[in-house]
Image (spheres, rainbow, N blue to C red):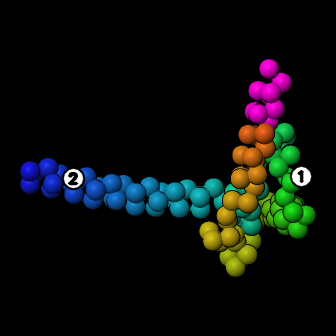
Amino acid sequence: MNKMASLGSRGAQSLSLGQRVFTAFREWYVYACGYRQIGLHKEDLLIEDDPDVTEALKRIPEDSLNMRNFRIKRAIDVTMKQTILPEELWTKPSEDVPFLDPIIQQVKAERKERELWDKQ
C-alpha cells in the first residue's frame, strides 16, 4: 500500500513538473510569436474572412471594435517600419484576455442550430 501511495505522490509531482514545463513553454512560445511586441492581442490575429468571426465582430461593443482596429493599424505600421513598440506599449499577459472567443462560440452554436433546424 505504501508503494502505491508513494507512486501516486510521484505521479502528482511529475504532473506538476509537467504543468510547470508546459506553462514555461507556452509563455516562451507566446513571446516568440511576437504579436505582443507589436501591441496585438491574441484575438486580433483572427482572420475576418471567417463568417463566424465577422458576425462576432458585429456583436462586440463599438469601443472594443475601435480598440481592436487601432491595435491592428498600429501593428501594421510598426511592421512596415520593421521595428517593434517600446516595451511599455507591449501587450501584457494580463491585458491579453479573450473578449471575442465567447461570442464566436455563441455564433457557431447559433449557426449549427440554424443548420440543424433547416435540415428538418
The residue carrying mark 1 is: 58
Task: Say which amino acid is labelled 1.
Answer: Lys
Residue shown at 28%/56% (left/top)?
Answer: 12
Q: Is residue 102 left or right of residue 10?
A: right
The residue carrying mark 2 is: 8
Task: Say which amino acid is labelled 2.
Answer: Gly
Residue 66: assigned label:
none
16 or 40: which is nearer to us? Answer: 16
Residue shown at 80%/20% (left/top)?
Answer: 119
Residue shown at 84%/65% (left/top)?
Answer: 64
Which x, y percent locates residue 98?
69, 59
Please give the range of residues in magenta. Answer: 111-120
Which x, y percent locates residue 22?
44, 55
Residue 92 occupies which quadrant of the picture? bottom right
Q: What whole-number distance in Å separates the C-alpha atoms at marks 1 and 2? A: 50 Å
Q: Crowding at label 1, few (<14), some or many (≥20) Cα neighbours within 10 Å?
A: few
Q: What is the quadrant of the C terminus in the image?
A: top right
Q: Is residue 26 left or right of residue 60?
A: left
Q: Is residue 94 left or right of residue 112?
A: left
Verify CB contact (< 8 Å) between mark 1 and mark 2: no
Which x, y percent locates residue 54?
86, 46
Residue shown at 73%/60% (left/top)?
Answer: 99
Which secondary structure lies at badge 1?
Answer: helix
Q: Is residue 29 left or right of residue 52?
A: left
Which x, y percent locates residue 87?
68, 76
Furthest residue to the front?
A: 120
